[in-house]
Image (cartoon, rainbow, N blue to C red):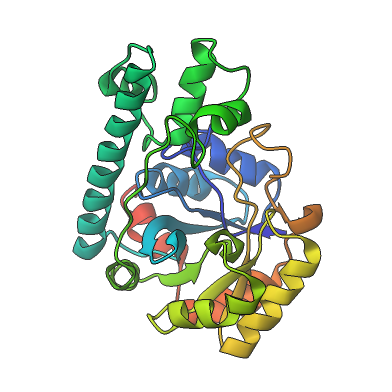
Amino acid sequence: MIDLHSHSSASDGIFSPKEAAEYAIGKKLKVWALTDHDTVDGLYEAAKTCAQSESQIIFLPGIEINVRWPSGEFHLLGMGLRRYSQDLKDLVADLTEYRRNRNQEIVDKMNLDGIEVTLEEIEGLFAESQIGRPHFASYLMKIGKVKHRQEAFDRFLGKGRPYYATHEGADLDVAVEAIRSAGGVPVLAHPLSLYVSWGKMDETIEKIKNHGVQGLEAWHPAARINEGFKLEQLAKKLGMFVTAGSDFHGKGVRADRHLGKTSGDRKIEDRFYFEELLPHLGDFDWRETEWCKSNA
């Protein structure tokens, strides 16, 4: 059992990178990827934890990048990062600025609605995190505005709701090049979040592929089992390899997100790493990546 998509508190997960790694080790995963949103901050601690464990786990350093697209945005996974290249540093810096501007817009809308809080106060509550809407949801729970995170999105933070602000993403070509410069491989995350009809799915994913995206995350908890098979067939038709992930953010955060499992609560098969992704990573050795060697 493996998992090629998960998050820590370096972005919007609830486990610290160390705790996330320990959880993956405890679940006896053969391969575990940490793919935090728009940051690599958690990779050092996660790599150290895996390297110091007695398990045989393979740690896959990654990132999940928010990308601009005509229909709005989509997420791009960078898998098997070997180094923190200058191109990736520049991209992360830009994305951090975009995210902070968006967060200020959310705060301004909350202020107009009578909630007196500053962005600095929000950031102070989540010092280790790349702040995003889930953190605002946690804050709304803290002040008693909502009872649970999903209510915060349904009433205030979701698209079309009072506190929603658009998220500016990276240019796709820039994101692909940044991933490659770091020694990684670009993979389209949870393609159903493109929100295009099945009739337009082929041409949409083909356009994205033509920008240099090599893989497709066909298996994700947001997809039904039949949709996972359909996306896998589409990937093969387009000449893309297939990955699978849980998009795990921590125990109890989402009822449908369990580490090592994907669509329909199916265990993630080893083949998605060893047969699909690994051939595209070449001579990849996670212990030789910057994230691991920096702890030596």
As drawn, is 255 to the left or to the right of 73? right
Is 110 located above or below residue 11 in the figure?
above
Report the residue at 70% width, 68% height from top.
270
Where's residue 180, x and y in %?
33, 73
Give the left or right position of residue 23, taking residue 183 as reference: right
Q: Does 229 sit left or right of 137 as displayed?
A: right
Kindly tell me whether residue 177 is visible in this rendering: yes
In the picture, residue 264 is in which quadrant?
Answer: bottom right
For residue 129, what is the image quadrant? top left
- Residue positioned 46% across, 45% down in the render: 46
Residue 9, x across and y down, in percent = 46, 35
Spot occupied by residue 142 in the image (x, y as percentages of width and height): 51, 13
Q: Is residue 269 above or below residue 59?
A: below
Residue at left 28%, top 59%? 84
Nearer to the camera, 52 or 88 = 88
The quadrant of the picture occupied by the N terminus is bottom right
Q: How many marks?
A: 0
Q: Is residue 93 above or below residue 114?
A: below
Q: Is residue 200 above or below residue 111?
A: below
Where does the image place residue 117, in percent across and percent down from the top left? Answer: 32, 14
Q: Is residue 127 visible?
A: no
